[in-house]
Image (cartoon, grey):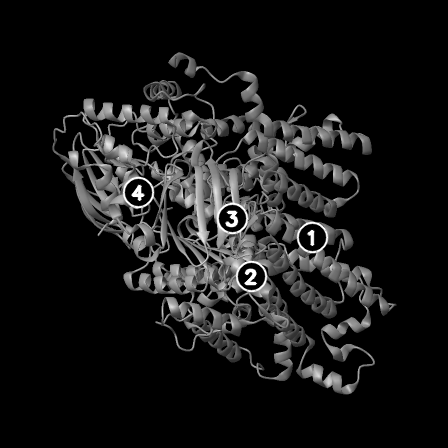
Amino acid sequence: MSGGILRREGALGKFYLVYKKLIIALGLILLLFVLGELTVSNFLSLGQILLTVKLASFIALFALCQMIVIAAGGSGLDLSVGYTATMTAVFTASIMDAQNANLWKAVLVALGVGLAVGLANGLLTAYVKLPPLVVTLAMSNILQGVVNVYTAGHAITGRPSPVLQIVAAKTTGIVPNILFLLALLAPIVMVVLYRTRWGMKLFGAGANPTAAYLSGVNVRLVRCAAFILSGVLASLIGLLLLGNMGIAFKDMGSNYVMPSIAAVVVGGVSLGGGDGNYLGVILGAVFLQTLTNLLVALGWGDAGKWVGFGVVLYVLLIVYVGNRRSR
Amino acid sequence: MSRRNRRISPLGRFIGKSEFSRLAILAAMFTLTAVLQQNFFETKAIVRNINAFMPLILMTMGQAVVIIAGGLDLSAGTALSLLTCVLTTVMKKSDPLTGVYALAAAFAVAMAIGVINGVGIGYLRIPPVIITFATSYLWLGIGLFLRPVPGGEAVDWFRAFYNAGLVEGVPAWLKAAGAVFPPALVLILIGCALWLIVARTRTGRYLYAVGGNNESAYVSGINTAAVQMRACLINSGFIFLTALFFVGQNQSGDARMGDPLTLRAIASAVVGGIALSGGRGSVFSALVGALIISFVNKIIFFANIPNAFQPLFGGLIVVLAIAGSQAYALSGKRSVEAGRLP
Amino acid sequence: MKVLEAVGIKKHFGGVVALSNGNLLCEAGRITGLLGANGSGKSTMSKIIAGVYGADAGEIRYQGRAVRHLKPNEARQQGIAMVYQNLSLVADLSIWENVVLGGERNKGLFLDDEQARDLAKEIVDQLLPGLDIRRAVHELNPGEMQIVEIAKAISAAPRLLILDEPTAALEQAQVRSLFRYMRALAERGVALVFTSHRLWEVMEICDEVTIFRNGENVGSIDFAHEGKDPQKIIAYITGEAQQSAGARGRAAGAGEVVFRVRELSLGSRLKNVSFQLRRGEILGIGGLAGQGQHELMLALAGGYPGLECTAEVAGRRVRLKRPAQAIRNRVLLVPGDRQLEGLFLNHSLFTNIVFPKLGLRRQPLFTPRRKYRRECAQAIDVLSIKAHSLDMPVSALSGGNQQKVVVGKWLSFQANVLLLADPAKGVDVGAKRDLYEYILKQVRENRLSVILYASDNEELIDYCDRLLIMYEGQIVASLEGGEITDDAIVSTSMRVR
């Protein structure tokens, strides 16, 4: 009898349940592809698709930060990821000075920055109990201020180490290298989230903080740690952004904040916390980047992009989050 | 044991011990600014200060209404920007009548904004923070669509919303009055009157009930969704008034000008005693909060802190203001015996 | 004149039948009392009449007309008002604003605050003279809040007023005022329904009493005609057949003291609770619902951050401030509300059972899946959990099986003390038997020590060696061995004078 219970769940049924949201995300992407091909010529060229996926990778990386913070529960969101990345890029550009030898110094600075920001966010949200959205929004403003101060005196000099440029900007053959990074990262993330005790504690804290607390988990610590991790990750992504762009400038990261959250919603991650499939989030990022391309190709430009994002997010929130009171 | 002079009415939610300390802080900031700004008490300077403070005051009052009802509006700043874009797109400098059309159009858009937010918060019960985050991009996008770069036109008489003296054909007495009693002040008073009226009606009472305890309000037979929708509409009204002022002042629309005001309005509301959890605070003390933040910003300006540092300090002030207010509010709270959750 | 007549009411929640045959008759000018043990259906009956729940079957006639499920505000408009237990106040508003909430009157365009204040003052003064109606509700103590709830219900000028345990939070003097007011209302022709756990209150204020047991009426007593006999009432409540003490064929061989608690207090919820537990003993906590039992169980597990529970566990003094500390000391809690406090509903059986292990020290970085899966399979075996896969979500399990999962979490821990907070609530008969079989086996063979809180007196009678009865946060009685009978439990719980 026990042998029976040890067997894994029947393939087809579980596949549908677990992967339902992934399938929906995939379906949305395909929908956009079809729409794109119909309305714009050459929408589905290989080059275009690869470019889309490359840009989507950066969104997916930022979305990982969001996913960690959201999964821990307590209405977690991190709006400071954009300027954390920007600040790191700005600080480390002159340190690296286009030398590989200085890369380790840059990484150290990045870790320090990310730790400081994440710790501040984590303490204010988990221990002082301020709403995460307001805290991280204010933090974003503060970081923006710091960047302004830093760049007011001098122009942002410095270029990234060649290693960073290779990883972030260049391609191997036709495949952008950043994809390899993501392909390496994604399984690591999945393993950590689903196969280690930290991951289970994280999801537990988000799914039912009371039950987690009564089972011995220090929920506040877990939530604080989530913000620290998000800050450090965002900071490291800043290095990649620098590698991709070649220079650092003031608005490097701020345009990624909204898509990072939208990607999480499209990917079917519950905003209340407790679950999250990174594959879905990656698909969500691809979807958003494809949407951006479509809107740009249609000539709608920046305006269309934001309207598109706003509408998509609103509709998805209704579908996934909204619950009309049924009494 | 009751406080003898404590009246609990919309105006009366004003007098209390925390209110006193808030007024004391305001007095301190006021004095400090007066000391730092040499011509502080001159009419021209007073008018200029009122004009500078006005947007934050109105935005804060509107945000306060939404927060009291249990919501939060992160799209307020971009909504403001959108309205300026709408105004300057509909208006044609050559035809004074377009000004009227613009007013109507902008008002309609403002109400639509309120409805879209209100449906999400009230009827669909999506967390206000995330739904207004989404709609903020909607307003930004539409604003950019109308005005990809700041610009647009405004009819001449629109300047009356900023300074009646600049408009041709205005009688001399009106100009003189406008120099002492600027339109900005009038707009603020309109906003105050709006709130005074609302506060005395059923809607006003229900804003507090729904924000204070949504479940209890529902069980008592209140239509909580409609109440929250109305809060969003009232907020839109305040944003609309602010937009009039901006276009009157700048004669142009800009899709991004309102962004910094969102967080500052929220911080001002919190400093003004509005609890982010809802159900508590008075819109008039939110006004006091906006004044405090405005004076603090002015002090920073006069303290000769280099230009570059000012946004940084602005952000720091927001964090300190919110953290401080929350901590202060929590310190005097009813003891939570069974507060067992982390 | 019949104001309300309910016949043959049936109501179930999920698999649990709350009412199988509920009947009630309320007449104008009379105060009807509802009595019954925990889970007898009397509370469900009140809520159905007030419109909070809808009946599954049966007929309700209000003022002669048949009515179907009314929503609370519809019921209020029709003249039926219910006094909730603090479900309907907005803490930040003042007393008078709460009293008229939902029923405000207008004077012209604006609210008629003056009229509202006058009305509130009039009612509140008769219930609790001297209470300033301008104070905010969050400043009040629970008794005063209850008075405001009552005033709110009365302000609707109802024809039928239902008071569901309104005296729970009130002091003697306040109860007297309330009774005076109820009498006055009755004289004005209002019909009242009153429930209380204090038998003497019911006997004092009610004209007649209807007794519920196991989801149906078992008797009615009209005090005017049949007199007031507490023994007779208790007999109705407990039922004649269950007078015998339950079988407890275990050697109550007292081991050494494994858990000693002294003077545990928590605000107004727990007052100076002290007791000791011996190894191999099952100590019961009983009493009427809501007397602090749930809070006690949580406090013993370190579940209240502000509260330090100083205790002796296996001879060592410990301070249990957090659940993690309690777990380290092997004081393990099976919480009372499994969905809210014990389970991750959307997660798998595996995750739920394995979860507490994650907090232990010296655990490997990667969860040893195969080892854990084997341990889970063992737990499922031992407790006979009916599930077809370790990966299925616990939300898909029945209540009984869910409860087994909550217990199964602790299987591999060597518990010093197992705290069971109402483990059989909402659990079907078979699962309940499995659970108790397992527990008794552990007690017998491994000298497990258990503190058992059960809302069903049968469980207490059948399984406990000793029983502590709680009332208003204090331990008011201790019964041992053969003293544990239904009669004794009911009378000590209800404070029969």
The kind of secondary structure element at disc 3 is loop
Q: Are marks 3 and 2 on the same chain?
A: no
Please tell me in which quadrant of the rendered image residue B102 appears: bottom right
Residue B119 appears at what percent x and percent y?
64, 50
In the current view of this chain or complex, which residue is farthest to the front? C225
Q: CA distance from mark 1 to mark 2?
A: 28 Å
* Residue C354 in view here: no
Residue B318: mark = none
Q: Which residue is mark 4?
A: C298
Q: Residue at x 53, y 28 (%)?
A: A186
Q: Residues within 10 Å of mark 1 (few under 14, many from 20)?
A: many
In the image, residue A262 sits, relative to residue C143, either above or below, namely: above
The label nearer to you, 2 versus 4, is: 2
Amino acid type assigned to the residue bearing label 4 in the image: Leu
Quarter of the figure that contains the N terminus of chain B: bottom left
Residue C222 vs residue C257, the one in the foreground: C222
Q: Is residue B26 left or right of residue C283?
A: right
Mark 3 or mark 4, which has the lower sequence index? 3
Amino acid type assigned to the residue bearing label 1 in the image: Trp
Amino acid type assigned to the residue bearing label 2 in the image: Tyr
Q: Which residue is mark 3?
A: C51
Q: Are marks 1 and 2 on the same chain?
A: yes
Q: Which residue is mark 1?
A: B139
In the image, residue C174 sits, relative to residue C421, either above or below, namely: below
Q: Could you tell me if the residues under marks 3 and 1 are in contact, i.e. CB atoms within 8 Å? A: no
The kind of secondary structure element at disc 2 is helix
Residue C449 appears at what percent x and percent y?
20, 31
Residue B235 vs residue C417, the one in the foreground: C417
Q: Which residue is mark 2?
A: B206
Amino acid type assigned to the residue bearing label 3 in the image: Gly
The label nearer to you, 3 versus 2, is: 3
Q: CA distance from mark 4 to mark 1?
A: 49 Å
